[in-house]
Amino acid sequence: MKPVHDKPAQPVGFPVPGWKPPVRPPRAPMAGRYCRIEPLEPARHSADLHESNSLDPRQRAWTYLPYGPFETEDAYVEWINASCSWRRSDVSRDR
């Protein structure tokens, strides 16, 4: 069995037969020792997240993800809206 590689040809490992995704966490803020995790709100979070995700010119943060990178904020928001719509019907960009 050969390891899988992503578009920039970075190794991402071997397939895991029978893998299933975990149960999604509740839509409530979770505070930890070093950070706070809260539900994604595209209108509030998209600009900062896209800017932060765009800082690495080699886009290595996307290596193990089945989506991205996103060249424009609009493309990023479109993906967020499509990804979040299964949980909330009111997800939209308020700009």
Image (cartoon, rainbow, N blue to C red):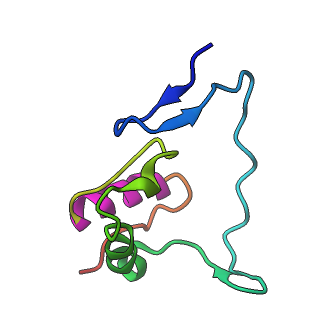
The percent coordinates of residue 76 (x first, y second) are 31, 61
The quarter of the displayed image where residue 15 is located = top right
Confirm whether the magenta stretch covers residue 82: yes
9 in relation to 63, above or below: above
78 in relation to 51, above or below: above
Residue at the image position 56 percent from the left and 58 percent from the top:
87
Residue at the image position 36 percent from the left and 74 percent from the top:
46
12 in relation to 95, above or below: above
Q: Please count the marks in the image.
A: 0
Name, please, the residue furthest toward the right: 33
Magenta stretch, residue numbers: 73-84
Residue at the image position 43 percent from the left and 68 percent from the top:
90
From the viewer's side, name the closer residue of 59 and 16: 59
Confirm whether the magenta stretch covers residue 52: no
- Majority secondary structure of magenta residues: helix
The percent coordinates of residue 81 (x first, y second) are 38, 59
Give left or right: position of 72 versus 42. left
Give left or right: position of 18 versus 38. right
The percent coordinates of residue 40 (x first, y second) are 51, 72
From the viewer's side, name the closer residue of 74 and 19: 19
36 in relation to 50, above or below: below
